[in-house]
């Protein structure tokens, strides 16, 4: 391995270490309380080193938003890639979203902008490019939901995006509910919500379709 390649790999690894530390700090302490020195200490790096990779904790937060959506997108893409009847595929799509929320609560907090419910000053300030990247990643997830709808009668609707947004809001709401409800209550709500979505999108299709 050449010197340049080794240096690039070291930079990539250090960047991953910083993001992991920031993810943990934001999750445990909240955005407003988190500081760059605290993140540096968690990453076992000098504070000045972090600024070589991220100019502010706002930029770190934005990168974690992008990272969270990428992980969710991968999970959703795998769910709809299988050969299965449309309703069963949609069922898998919903399960994939909720499974990601259960398995990665730290991303759920970040992706859902839980930090916005903190005290004034606790909301990250994102620049235009950061907002664009985040929206691109969220839109990529919604495109997969659009493909799911395209396999049903909803595919002929004029306002498919409206239907996608409605389903997305319901799933996001369920994911947030997961953070405050006991397991039995959550699973009951998830079962009911999934039935509402599937019966609306695939009326009369039944479990075998």
Image (cartoon, rainbow, N blue to C red):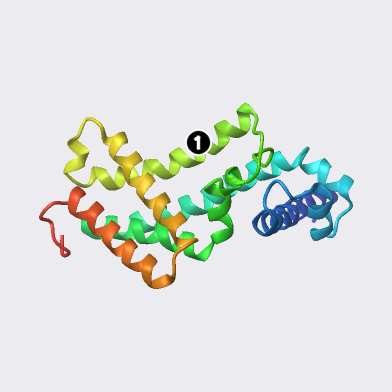
Q: Nearer the viewer, residue 145 or 195?
A: 195
Query: Which residue in the protein does label 1 denote?
Result: 136
Q: Residues within 10 Å of mark 1 (few under 14, many from 20)?
A: some
- Quarter of the image for the C terminus: give it: bottom left
Taking the spot 47% from the left edge, 41% from the top edge, the residue there is 138
- As drawn, which residue projects farthest toward the bottom? 184
Residue 25 placement (x, y as % from top left): 71, 56
Q: In the rendered image, which quarter is residue 198 located in?
A: bottom left
Pinpoint residue 91: horizontal percent, then vertical percent: 28, 59
Image location (x, y in percent) of residue 18:
75, 53
- Quick check: 34 left or right of 202? right
Q: Quadrant of the N terminus?
A: bottom right
Q: Residue furthest top?
A: 128
Residue 14 visible to an observer of this rendering: yes
Count how many numbered circles sit on residues in the image: 1
| Residue at point 25%, 32% (across, down) | 159
Q: Quadrant of residue 85?
A: bottom left
Residue 86 seen from this side: no
Query: Farthest residue toward the front?
Result: 119
Residue 160 appears left or right of 15: left
Residue lying at 58% horizontally and 45% vertically, measured from the top left: 117
Where is 153 relative to 202, above or below?
A: above
User: Which residue sits at x=27%, y=35%?
Assistant: 160
Q: Is residue 197 left or right of residue 141?
A: left
Q: Callout 1: helix, strand or loop?
A: helix
């Amino acid at each position: 391995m050449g010197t340049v390649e080794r240096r690039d790999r070291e930079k990539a690894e250090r960047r991953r270490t910083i993001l992991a530390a920031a993810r943990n700090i934001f999750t445990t302490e909240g955005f407003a309380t988190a500081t760059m020195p605290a993140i540096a200490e968690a990453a076992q790096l000098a504070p000045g080193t972090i600024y070589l990779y991220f100019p502010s904790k706002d930029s770190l937060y934005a990168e974690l938003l992008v990272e969270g959506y990428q992980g969710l997108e991968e999970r959703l893409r795998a769910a709809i890639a299988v050969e299965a009847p449309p309703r069963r595929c949609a069922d898998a799509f919903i399960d994939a979203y909720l499974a990601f929320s259960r398995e990665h609560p730290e991303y759920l907090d970040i992706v859902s902008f839980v930090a916005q419910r903190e005290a004034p000053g606790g909301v990250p300030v994102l620049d235009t490019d950061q907002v664009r990247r985040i929206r691109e990643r969220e839109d990529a997830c919604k495109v997969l939901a659009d493909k799911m709808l395209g396999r049903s009668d909803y595919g002929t609707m004029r306002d498919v995006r409206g239907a996608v947004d409605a389903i997305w809001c319901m799933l996001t709401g369920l994911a947030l509910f997961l953070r405050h409800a006991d397991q039995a209550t959550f699973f009951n709500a998830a079962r009911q919500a999934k039935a509402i979505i599937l019966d609306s999108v695939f009326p009369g299709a039944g479990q075998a379709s």
